[in-house]
C-alpha cells in the first residue's frame, strides 16, 4: 500500500521560517484507561433506560455540546485576534499537532481517535474562518487524494480551490490568489515527485507543513479479471500499482 505525502506551499513572506511537521499519536494514558471503564459502565446503564428517556438524554447532551462548541469557537477566535499577526496565527501546524496528540492520549472512547479528530478539525476550521478564510489551492480534481489531504489539514470551512497541474498550484500561491498550496511531494513506491521539486526551484515558496495519507486504488471491470487485456489509469496510479499488476494481471 503506497503512502503519499503532501506538502503545502506558501509564500515565504506569509509563512516565515520553514516548518515541517509530522502527525503523531500518543499512547493512551492511565487516565484514559480509567475513563474508558467508566464509559463502559455508563453505556451498560443506558441500555436499561427506556427509548423515551434515552431520547431526552440525547437532546440534553446536544444542547450542551452546542453551547460548548460555540464557547470553544469563540475562545479560538479571540485568541487568534489577539495575536500580533492574526493571519499567520490562523495556520499553526505545531499547535494543531499538539492538539491531535492530546486528543489521542485523552480519548476515552467508544469513538475512535480518527472520528474525534475529524470533529475537532472542523470546529477549528470554522473558528479560524471567523478571523480569515483560508484559500487553499490543490492538485485536483475534487475528491482526488490531494483534495482529501487538504480536507485533513484545513477542514471543510477552508476555501479549497482545485487546479489542473502542480505548476498551477504554485502559481496560484505565488500570485497571491491562494494563501497555501497543497501538492504531492513523495510516495513510498515512486519516491519524490519531480514536478513538485522542480517548482520549488523556480518560485520563492517553501514547505510549511506535511500531511501523510494512505493511497488505495481499485480495479473496476465488467468481466472476470482473467479476461482483462488493457488497463486505463493515470501514469502515477499505474506506477504505484505496478508490482500488484505484474503479479496479478500479467496478461494486461
Image: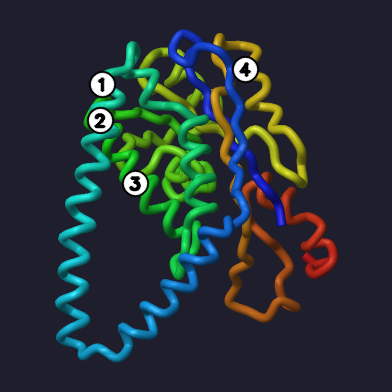
> Is 71 situated left or right of 28 in this image?
left
Residue 81 is marked as 1
- Which residue is pictured at 15% across the width and 86% down the height? 52
- Which residue is pictured at 21% across the width and 81% down the height? 54
Q: Are marks 1 and 3 in contact (CB under 8 Å)?
A: no
Please state the horizontal and vertical placement of residue 124, each as a whole percent of the image: 34, 40
Identify the mark nearer the N-term, 2 or 4: 2
> Is 179 situated left or right of 247 in this image?
left
Q: Are marks 1 and 2 in contact (CB under 8 Å)?
A: yes
Bin the neighbour count of mark 4 within 10 Å (Cα to Cα): few under 14, some 14-19, many 20 and up: some
Residue 77 is marked as 2
- Does dot 3 land on a helix, a strand or a loop? helix
Whether residue 61 is situated above or below residue 5 in the rendered picture? below
Residue nearest the observer in this picture, 38 or 247: 38
- Which residue is pictured at 71% across the width and 28% down the height? 194
Please state the horizontal and vertical placement of residue 15, each as a whole percent of the image: 48, 16
Please state the horizontal and vertical placement of residue 234, each as a whole percent of the image: 62, 48
Q: Of tags 3 and 2, which is closer to the observer?
A: 2
- Which residue is pictured at 73% across the width and 33% down the height? 192
Per the image, the residue denoted by label 4 is 200
Amino acid at each position: 500500500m503506497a503512502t503519499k505525502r503532501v506538502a503545502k506551499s506558501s509564500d515565504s513572506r506569509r509563512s516565515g521560517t520553514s516548518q515541517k511537521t509530522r502527525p503523531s499519536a500518543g499512547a493512551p494514558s492511565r487516565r484514559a484507561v480509567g475513563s474508558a471503564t467508566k464509559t463502559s459502565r455508563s453505556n451498560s446503564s443506558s441500555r436499561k433506560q427506556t427509548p423515551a428517556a434515552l431520547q431526552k438524554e440525547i437532546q440534553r447532551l446536544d444542547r450542551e455540546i452546542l453551547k460548548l462548541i460555540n464557547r470553544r469557537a469563540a475562545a479560538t477566535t479571540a485568541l487568534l485576534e489577539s495575536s500580533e499577526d492574526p493571519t499567520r496565527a490562523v495556520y499553526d501546524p505545531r499547535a494543531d499537532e499538539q492538539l491531535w496528540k492530546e486528543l489521542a492520549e485523552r480519548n476515552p472512547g467508544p469513538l475512535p481517535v480518527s472520528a474525534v479528530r475529524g470533529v475537532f478539525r472542523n470546529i477549528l476550521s470554522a473558528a479560524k474562518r471567523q478571523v480569515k478564510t483560508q484559500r487553499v489551492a490543490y492538485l485536483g480534481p475534487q475528491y482526488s487524494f490531494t483534495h482529501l489531504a487538504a480536507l485533513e489539514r484545513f477542514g471543510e470551512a477552508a476555501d479549497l480551490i482545485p487546479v489542473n497541474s502542480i505548476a498551477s498550484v504554485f502559481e496560484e500561491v505565488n500570485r497571491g490568489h491562494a494563501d497555501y498550496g497543497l501538492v504531492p511531494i513523495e510516495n513510498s513506491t515512486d519516491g519524490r515527485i519531480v514536478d513538485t521539486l522542480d517548482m520549488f526551484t523556480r518560485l520563492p515558496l517553501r514547505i510549511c507543513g506535511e500531511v501523510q495519507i494512505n493511497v488505495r486504488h481499485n480495479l473496476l471491470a465488467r468481466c472476470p479479471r482473467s479476461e482483462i487485456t488493457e488497463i486505463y489509469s493515470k501514469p502515477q496510479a499505474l506506477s504505484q500499482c505496478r508490482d500488484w499488476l505484474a503479479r496479478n494481471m500479467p496478461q494486461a
